[in-house]
């Protein structure tokens, strides 16, 4: 049996699918999930087997996603289920073919070898005393830089069947689906995420590994990571130069930044462990990584606590299978999960009881779970610990044990206050701690009571001062203070100006932001903006930008009573944000922007990971209840967009700068509604928030989520009379397009991006679509026929993709739904225009086909046929149903006639009768008679 025959064998494909389905893979570009494939897997695999036999198999384009681990990003390819089956079958046969040719030091992606075995082997070698130095190496972008021509030559040495090589080529050279919906070619490298990439990577370097194994060293290569043990540094340096030269022949190179050459006693981190002459140990960063994973479950999941602990148990179980050494510390997430798992195991539980005071907790759901657990176990001292630790007043070293009688009165109060806090409960807690002579705890509850009953943040909106009123106080030391507190990324900044259309723009300056520039900003010589986020995804402040919407300004102008009325609304919104922050125990600062709204600034003690700030933004957004949609716009700095290489993200104007459009100066406002004039005093007194406070706020608000109920878009299209059937079909089927068009009709306002989205869809539906764009835009306040026509004439050649629209309108599509499913067709990407295309079986000249490359008319028609394959199948299925129905009616009529004939034949007691057509004969059969006419 040839190799290709083995690969495509139906049983091998079935086995391959069983391996694939265990991993519950994500859907590929065809959007078919593993559950859907599993439900019909026998038919799918038979069809796949047939396609492979007849050489009709073509892989679906690769769907690329980015996986983020901390600050690192890795691009992963997602494949269709059938492609993953083929890859798994190929990989299994290649492993059988090549495994015996791999050397002992090749550990990754091999049956019977694991990272743990590699660690144990290295640790054993390090403790032998034979080796003195360690060389750790990393191959830069290994998978992405594999050269196809070299790989194919290596494969051809053992594989003679062109069918097999062609199958591998199809996978390696498969195109990928870009965010725009277009298909991107690949010129080198192999996709990470492909089932055959691991075995191909080992095949690619098997000659290199064999060459290295012949040297007087010990080595392990695990994919792109290598660790070598040698006898002295000089010989290892010489070998390193040879390794670099050897890898150049494969188009590969060593990552100089990750290269480590050190003595064996110092050790290195490799495959998760710290390895040295003393053996192996769990590095602190591995324990921190586990805690971060568990923390992410708690902070980002809307699941109930039981579900979180179930997920945590899976992560902990996997972690402990790999890291088996003694632990120095466990996090509260791990602790509560272990408590859940050990509830009925007294020995384990007793150990955990003793560990409890060593673990800190700020999470409300965990505090409530553990306090209830200790109550059931009749451990009141631990129940009280949970409450006091959550409220940050647990200090066992400062106080003695509280009397049992007082503790027993405290516990029911805490049980109530964890559910609902009120003045009476606060007073009783304060009094009980006073009676127990724990005065600092009593003071905590007294202070909390005063905050609850005291005045909340308010500030008035005073008449806007002109920039000419130079009443702010600053000196030459002020720029230094501003750089220290209210500026972001240090190596770049922007200068604000007006373009030809009098629109504000930021011009990037690839230079450090200096005290000189800040001084010029304060003096009005320029208006500088700071970039919020560093390239390592950290921020030093966040800003909530609250503005009058452009819709309102277009409707009323900026020097009217209505404008100032809406400006008051932005002030009220800023006040609401400050109140909310105050309830979180956080200080915010309101700044008048100089034109149409306010900025609320929140400063941090250090550069903090942006993921925590994004979670805080989500919480603030969910808690706010602002004016009706469209009146006020809110933007968060930082937003949730990840910085891509070469991009710098958002920039925000520095405080106390001149607004380039109005000429007005921005300024901070104190709690009394008065402009802050003394900058130095203000900057020196800024309250800065530590990460621990943000985590506590997030932890205390776990379970609070915006009640975002699914909404429906008005399906009444009376506002759009006389539209073509193609336009109507898109409006009926695409919730997003219907939402945008209805918004224009009802509010008279669309943002620039919303206008472009409508244009990029309906301009591709021929003249009727272009006329419809004018109909929609005519509802807007600033509609001009010539301007709209000019934009239509500049419309891109291809319609916008569904992927791009979902990315731009995440919130809208989440609320109103965006779940259209189109058949994935080669050379074609999903777009709302597909609804119009699906109406007809034939190619329409006036509709732009969403294709990723130029193709012939014949191929375009083929694409249309593929898109409408379900429609055609439905038509044929309905015909079959009709014919079967007709057949059933005919069968019934024939049976009636046969009964009548039988009755006649029975009456005359005969089985044959002469008629004009011939001899009518009745013959018995198993379930009745058959009737024949013999001529």
Image (spheres, grey):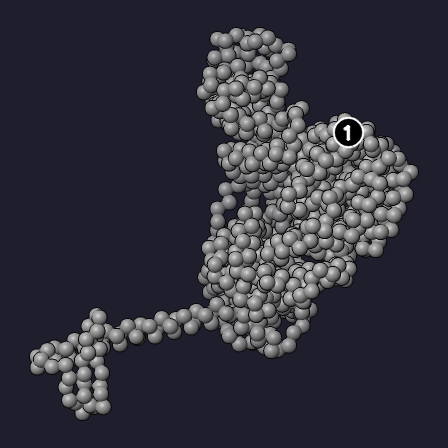
Q: Residue at x 52, y 19 (%)?
A: 347
In terms of image quadrants, where is residue 264?
Answer: top right
Q: Residue at x 50, y 42 (%)?
A: 707
Q: Is residue 124 left or right of residue 81?
A: right
Name the element at disc 1: loop
Is 5 situated above or below 931?
Answer: above
Point out the image quarter for the N terminus. Answer: bottom right
Is 24 situated above or below 921?
Answer: above
Q: Residue at x 58, y 29 (%)?
A: 333
Q: Is residue 408 left or right of residue 907?
A: right
Any part of residue 32 in sight: no
Q: Position of residue 604 (x, y in %)?
A: 72, 32
Is 122 situated above or below 647?
Answer: above
Neighbor class of circle 1 (other Cα within 10 Å; few <14, some 14-19, many 20+) is some
Which residue is farthest bottom? 916
Q: Is residue 217 left or right of residue 453?
A: right
The one of 641 and 873 positioned closer to us in this rendering:
873
In terms of image quadrants, where is residue 873?
Answer: bottom left
Point out the image quarter for the C terminus. Answer: bottom left
Identify the residue under disc 1.
127
Q: Position of residue 561 (x, y in %)?
A: 62, 48
């Amino acid at each position: 049996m040839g190799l290709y025959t083995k690969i495509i064998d139906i049983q091998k494909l079935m086995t391959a699918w069983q391996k694939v389905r265990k991993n519950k893979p994500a859907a590929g570009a065809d959007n078919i999930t593993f559950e859907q494939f599993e439900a019909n897997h026998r038919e799918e695999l038979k069809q796949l087997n047939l396609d492979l036999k007849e050489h009709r198999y073509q892989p679906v384009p690769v769907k690329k996603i980015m996986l983020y681990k901390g600050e690192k990003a890795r691009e992963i390819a997602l494949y269709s289920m059938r492609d993953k089956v083929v890859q798994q079958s190929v990989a299994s046969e290649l492993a059988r073919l090549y495994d015996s040719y791999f050397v002992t030091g090749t550990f990754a992606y091999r049956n019977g070898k694991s990272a743990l075995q590699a660690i144990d082997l290295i640790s054993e070698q390090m403790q032998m005393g034979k080796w003195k130095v360690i060389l750790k190496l990393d191959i830069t972008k290994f998978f992405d830089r594999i050269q196809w021509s070299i790989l194919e030559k290596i494969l051809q040495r053992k594989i003679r069947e062109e069918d097999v090589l062609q199958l591998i080529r199809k996978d390696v050279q498969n195109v990928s689906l870009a965010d725009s919906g277009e298909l991107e070619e690949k010129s080198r490298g192999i996709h990470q995420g492909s089932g055959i990439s691991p075995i191909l990577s080992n095949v690619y370097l098997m000659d290199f590994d064999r060459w290295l194994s012949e040297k007087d060293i010990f080595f392990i290569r695990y994919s792109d990571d290598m660790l070598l043990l040698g006898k002295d540094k000089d010989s290892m340096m010489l070998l390193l130069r040879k390794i670099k030269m050897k890898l150049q022949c494969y188009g590969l190179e060593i990552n100089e930044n990750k290269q480590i050459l050190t003595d064996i006693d110092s050790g290195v981190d490799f495959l998760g462990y710290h390895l040295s002459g003393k053996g192996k140990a769990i590095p602190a960063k591995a324990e921190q990584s586990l805690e971060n994973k568990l923390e992410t479950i708690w902070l980002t999941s809307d699941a109930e606590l039981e579900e979180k602990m179930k997920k945590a148990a899976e992560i902990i179980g996997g972690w402990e299978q790999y890291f088996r050494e003694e632990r120095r510390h466990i996090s509260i997430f791990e602790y509560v999960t272990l408590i859940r798992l050990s509830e009925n195991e007294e020995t384990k539980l007793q150990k955990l009881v003793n560990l409890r005071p060593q673990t800190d907790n700020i999470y409300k759901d965990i505090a409530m779970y553990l306090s209830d657990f200790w109550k059931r176990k009749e451990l009141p001292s631990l129940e009280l610990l949970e409450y006091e630790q959550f409220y940050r007043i647990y200090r066992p070293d400062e106080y003695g044990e509280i009397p049992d009688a007082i503790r027993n009165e405290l516990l029911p109060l805490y049980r109530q206050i964890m559910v609902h806090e009120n003045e009476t409960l606060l007073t009783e807690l304060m009094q009980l701690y006073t009676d127990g002579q724990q005065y600092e705890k009593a003071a905590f509850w007294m202070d909390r009571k005063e905050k609850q009953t005291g005045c909340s943040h308010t500030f008035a909106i005073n008449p806007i001062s002109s920039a000419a009123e130079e009443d702010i106080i600053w000196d030459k030391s002020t720029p230094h203070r501003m750089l220290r507190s209210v500026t972001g990324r240090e190596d770049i900044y922007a200068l604000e100006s007006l373009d030809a259309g009098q629109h504000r723009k930021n011009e990037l300056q690839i230079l450090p932001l200096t005290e000189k520039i800040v001084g010029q900003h304060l003096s009005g010589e320029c208006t500088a903006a700071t970039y919020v986020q560093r390239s390592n995804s950290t921020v030093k402040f966040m800003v909530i930008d609250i503005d009058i919407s452009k819709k309102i300004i277009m409707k009323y102008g900026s020097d009217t009573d209505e404008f100032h009325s809406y400006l008051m609304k932005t002030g009220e919104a800023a006040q609401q944000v400050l109140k909310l922050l105050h309830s979180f125990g956080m200080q915010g600062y309101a700044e008048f922007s100089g034109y149409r709204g306010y900025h609320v600034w929140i400063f941090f003690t250090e550069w903090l990971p942006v993921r925590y700030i994004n979670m805080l933004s989500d919480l603030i957004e969910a808690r706010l209840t602002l004016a009706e949609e469209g009146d006020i716009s809110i933007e968060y700095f930082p937003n949730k967009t990840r910085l891509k290489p070469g991009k710098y993200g958002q920039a925000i104007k520095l405080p106390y700068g001149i607004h380039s459009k109005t000429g007005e100066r921005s300024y901070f406002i104190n709690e009394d509604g008065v402009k802050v004039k003394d900058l130095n005093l203000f900057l020196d007194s800024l309250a800065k928030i530590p990460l621990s406070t943000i985590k506590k706020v997030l932890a205390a608000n776990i379970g609070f989520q915006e009640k975002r109920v699914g909404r429906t878009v008005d399906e009444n299209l009376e506002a759009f009379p006389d539209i073509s059937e193609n336009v109507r079909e898109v409006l009926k089927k695409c919730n997003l397009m219907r939402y945008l068009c209805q918004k224009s009709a009802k509010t008279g306002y669309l943002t620039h991006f919303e206008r472009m989205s409508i244009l990029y869809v309906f301009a591709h539906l021929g003249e009727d679509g272009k006329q419809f764009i004018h109909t929609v835009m005519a509802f807007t306040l600033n509609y001009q026929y010539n301007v709209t026509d000019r934009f239509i004439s500049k419309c891109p050649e291809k319609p916008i993709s569904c992927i791009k629209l979902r990315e731009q309108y995440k919130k809208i599509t989440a609320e109103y739904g965006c779940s259209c499913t189109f058949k994935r067709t080669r050379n074609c990407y999903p777009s709302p225009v597909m609804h119009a295309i699906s109406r007809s079986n034939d190619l329409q000249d006036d509709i732009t086909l969403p294709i990723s490359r130029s193709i012939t008319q014949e191929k375009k028609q083929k694409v249309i046929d593929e898109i409408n394959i379900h429609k055609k199948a439905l038509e044929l299925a309905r015909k079959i149903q009709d014919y079967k129905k007709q057949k059933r009616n005919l069968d019934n009529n024939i049976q009636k006639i046969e009964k009548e004939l039988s009755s006649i034949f029975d009456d005359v007691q005969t089985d044959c009768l002469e008629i004009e057509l011939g001899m009518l004969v009745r013959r018995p059969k198993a379930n009745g008679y058959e009737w024949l006419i013999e001529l």
